[in-house]
Image: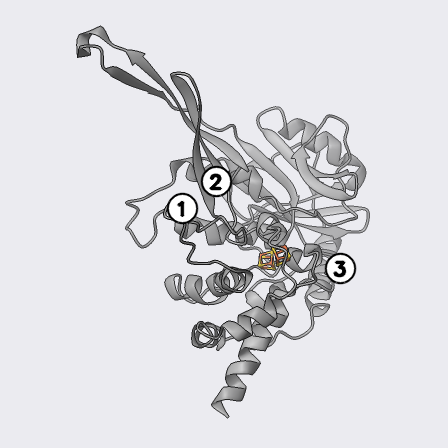
Amino acid sequence: MATQKYIAFADIPAWLEELSAAQTVYAPRREGKAVVYRPWQKGEQPELVERPTESAKHIVFPRAEELFRFNYQQAPETGGSKKLSLAEPADPAPAVVFAALPCDTRGFLFFDPVYSGSGTNGKFQDIYYLKRRACTTLITRTCRAPLATCFCNWTGGGPANREGADVLSTDVEGGLFLEALTEKGEAVLKSAALSPATEAHISAAQSSRDKAARSMGDAPDLGRTPPALISLFENLDFWREQSAGCLSCGACTYLCPTCYCFNITDESNGISGVRLRSWDACMFALFTLEASGHNPRNGRAARLRNRVGHKFSYYPGLHEGRFSCCGCGRCIKSCPSSIDIRRIVQNALAATEASRG
Ligand code: SF4
Ligand code: SF4
């Protein structure tokens, strides 16, 4: 049977201190108006009241990461031509993410098939992502009070979703009930800072999970969304209306736990330098700008169409019908123009329903 433990809120720093001896522990911390995942510092009590503003994706998929260093040398044996040497970065250190939201944990499941080369039989594997993913343990925390912007239940998740988690923790009186879901989860629950869970903890955690699930209300049927979005592809009037207020700021993509696009640049100084991978966003005008000057997505309407279409039509078409949106609602909460992806999906369904008569 899976290990089940309990920890009082006051004892959480002692447990994290023990874990941090062998790995980097990330936990939610308040910084100004935001709550962000940062390396935990000795004695720190994580922020467990307000929900994280950002997702935990940067811990496995850094905002900018070094792919390798390069150096050109003048090589006499090659008749003066340049010789290139490459140095790969060290393997990533093991990490633990404490109190990840269930939608954030689930978000990694949309990266996994893409970065492990699913569809190419593993031919194109992203070793940088896969190494970090393998050495990261995710301790998820059941949501106690989903926000008005949350809609994880529309896209197959829920406030106590276990998918992708190594440990599921749930608030009970005075502390957390912890349940190991994988071998990595079992390893982090082997700690003297934790005590065995009682029947009362198990039952209180179940009530807490049920209550959170009930608070989400009913989810609409989004089954017709992929064909609806395809049928609206050429309807730029529809997309102009949906994107009218968009500022192309990219906040929606940067905060999204399932957006995985990147750019690659070489930063060099003389004969040596570093190749970097950095986050990029399809909501930026330059994202698809070609060297010729042509931009196939030259306008907010085409860019928003791509973002919504990718999550609710193209990705599910390639990955067993799964929407690549975990319903975290961050793009809704943080959009300066109050653009709501739920409303766009529902408008698309309504528009195609109306045209079918
Ligand atoms: S956050 Fe809102 S305004 Fe900014 S790019 Fe996204 S949709 Fe446009
Ligand atoms: S599209 Fe919006 S709601 Fe969906 S996962 Fe991304 S940020 Fe969350």
Mark 2 vs 3, N-terminal side: 2
Is residue 81 placed above or below 227 in the rendered structure? above
The residue closer to the viewer here, 264 or 44, is 264
The quarter of the picture showing ligand 2: bottom right
Residue picked out by circle 2: 133
Q: CA distance from mark 1 to mark 3?
A: 32 Å
Return the mark for residue 355.
none
Residue type, numbered disc 3: Ala
Q: Quadrant of residue 124?
A: top left
Residue type, numbered disc 1: Tyr
Q: Position of residue 179 (x, y in %)?
A: 62, 48
Q: Secondary structure at mark 2?
A: helix
Residue picked out by circle 3: 145
Q: Secondary structure at mark 3?
A: loop
The residue closer to the viewer here, 178 or 316, is 316
Q: Quadrant of residue 15?
A: top right
**Mark 1 Cα-neighbour bin, 10 Å: few <14, some 14–19, many ≥20:** some
Residue picked out by circle 1: 115
Q: Position of residue 165 (x, y in %)?
A: 56, 49
